[in-house]
Image (spheres, rainbow, N blue to C red):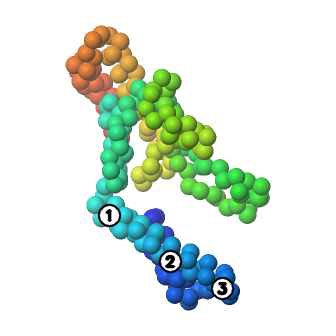
């Protein structure tokens, strides 16, 4: 989606910058400035989109101890035991809210959001900003080819399976729980045969 949109805005920016698409008077000058800005900004987005498309570097890794989003750079591992339920929702647009639904259209695509459990110390400022803007503390970068509801269900399924195991392992094995964790996880994987489906 980023690549076609980037190419369209590069073309429009170029056409506005060379006055093929223009306006009279001071609006013409403003259109040229906006056009060149769009050309530069979206011109930088096109190689980024091509990189992600050609290298297949955008994916979500689900592991027994948490999940990790990969893109241009790798995100940190988010343990299942630190997050609450995942929710699929569309971000509200306050500018379009007063308009009737038939004018607004379907709106933005749905995304998957989640909140951290109380007591998790990481990224407090960013989480507060996200909470104010979206109603949730964090979200997944993409839906990775799934519908948002399907991805939220998948994430909740993995979370419910592994968050309880991690807490149980830490509770039953005081001290270094990580040494007992692999055997506990292996028993869980053997007990749940269709885990990766």
Q: Is residue 97 above or below residue 113?
A: below
Callout 3 secondary element? loop
Q: Residue at the location (56% across, 81% down)? A: 32
Is residue 38 positioned above or below 69 on the image?
below
Rate crowding at label 1 as few (under 14), some (14 to 19) or many (20 or more) other CA atoms within 10 Å. Answer: some
For the residues marked 2 and 3, what is the alpha-carbon distance in whole angstroms? Answer: 15 Å
Q: Residue at x 47, y 75 (%)?
A: 39
State the CA–CA distance, disc 2 to disc 1: 23 Å
The residue pinned by badge 3 equals 23
- The disc label shown at residue 140, or none: none
For marks 2 and 1, the one nearer the N-term is 2
Does dot 1 land on a helix, a strand or a loop? helix
Given residues 25 and 104, the one toward you in this image is: 25
The image position of residue 91, as x and y in percent, is: 61, 49
Compared to residue 134, the image places residue 100 above or below, namely: below
- Give the residue pinned by disc 1: 51
Q: How far apart are the two marked residues, 1 and 3, measured between alpha carbons?
A: 36 Å
Q: Position of residue 58 (x, y in %)?
A: 35, 54
The mark closer to the camera, 1 or 3, is: 3
Q: Quadrant of residue 165?
A: top left
Q: Residue at x 41, y 52 (%)?
A: 144
Q: Can you identify the residue that label 2 sits on?
A: 36
Q: Is 169 in front, or is 9?
A: 9
Query: In the depicted view, which residue is nearer to us: 30 or 106?
Result: 30
């Amino acid at each position: 989606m980023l690549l076609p949109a980037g190419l369209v805005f590069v073309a429009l920016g170029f056409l506005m910058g060379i006055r093929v698409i223009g306006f009279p008077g001071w609006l013409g000058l403003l259109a040229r400035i906006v056009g060149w800005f769009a050309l530069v900004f979206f011109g930088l987005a096109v190689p980024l989109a091509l990189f992600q498309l050609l290298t297949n570097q955008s994916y979500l890794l689900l592991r027994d101890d948490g999940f990790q989003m990969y893109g241009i750079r790798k995100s940190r591992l988010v343990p299942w035991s630190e997050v609450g339920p995942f929710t699929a929702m569309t971000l509200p647009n306050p500018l379009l809210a007063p308009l009737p639904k038939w004018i607004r259209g379907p709106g933005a695509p749905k995304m998957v959001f989640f909140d951290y459990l109380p007591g998790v110390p990481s990224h407090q400022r960013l989480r507060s900003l996200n909470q104010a803007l979206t109603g949730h503390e964090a979200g997944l970068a993409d839906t990775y080819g799934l519908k948002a509801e399907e991805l939220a269900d998948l994430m909740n399924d993995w979370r419910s399976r592994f968050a309880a195991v991690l807490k149980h392992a830490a509770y039953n094995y005081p001290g270094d729980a990580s040494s007992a964790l692999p055997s506990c996880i292996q028993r869980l994987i053997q007990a749940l045969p269709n885990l990766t489906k």
